[in-house]
Image (cartoon, rainbow, N blue to C red):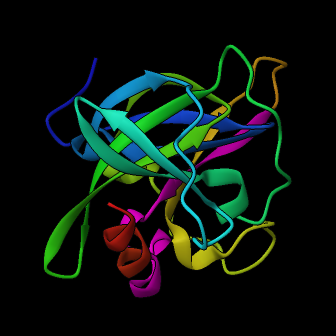
Amino acid sequence: MAGPADRQFVTLGLGAEVFAVSVSHVREILDYQPPFAIPEGPDYLMGLTDVRGRGTPTLDLRLKLGLPCVEPTGATRILVLDVPVDDRVLSLGLVADRVIEVVAFSESQIEGAPDIGVPWRSDYIQGVVRRETGSGGSGFVVIFDLGRLLTSQDAAALSQAA
């Protein structure tokens, strides 16, 4: 049961890695559909997804993190997020291999972002939480800092796309 100081997160998977975004930024989770392609965008900008009649820029989270691209499966989802960037809120879709669950983490569980030892840029990371894995081992859930995941150049490109 979540306590008063707990924060809610949606966990998502990219391969064997588990990431999390704050529930407060998640508007909805959609089944994967190929976005409408936009010419001359960054390679990780897949295109626009129709979200309730509005074209929402959609990013391939794997490519944004420098991970290899994979073909979508039946578990692939698009997380529609409202991300605060500079002085506005940007709506965008993030494509993840799978959405796992909504979980609560207490502030005491969240450790600072590591400086080294992860295969993606650590400045995207708000913190990490240790977790038990199904095989009795342990791993980490990496919490994204969504504002940093999108650079000002990204925000400009996505604003133009929309």
- Looking at the rendered structure, the number of numbered marks drawn on it comes to 0
Instruction: Tell me: residue 149, above or below residue 34.
Output: below
Question: Quick check: is 71 in the magenta stretch?
Answer: no
Instruction: Tell me: residue 46, above or below residue 53.
Output: below
- Is 94 on the left-hand or right-hand side of 135? left
Residue 47: image x %, image y %? Answer: 52, 52
Q: Residue at x 65, y 64 (%)?
A: 64
The span picked out in magenta is 138-154
Quarter of the image with the N terminus is: top left
- Is 64 on the left-hand or right-hand side of 59? right
Instruction: Tell me: residue 149, above or below residue 16.
Output: below
The single residue placed furthest to the front in the displayed view is 39
Quarter assignment of residue 18: top right
Question: Quick check: is 147 in the magenta stretch?
Answer: yes
Q: Residue at x 42, y 33 (%)?
A: 10
Quarter assignment of residue 146: bottom left
Residue 52: image x %, image y %? Answer: 23, 29
Q: Residue at x 65, y 17 (%)?
A: 75
Residue 88: image x %, image y %? Answer: 15, 72
Quarter assignment of residue 110: bottom left
Residue 152: image x %, image y %? Answer: 39, 85
Quarter of the image with the C terminus is: bottom left
The single residue placed furthest to the bottom in the displayed view is 153
Residue 102 versus residue 137: which sits nearer the camera? 102
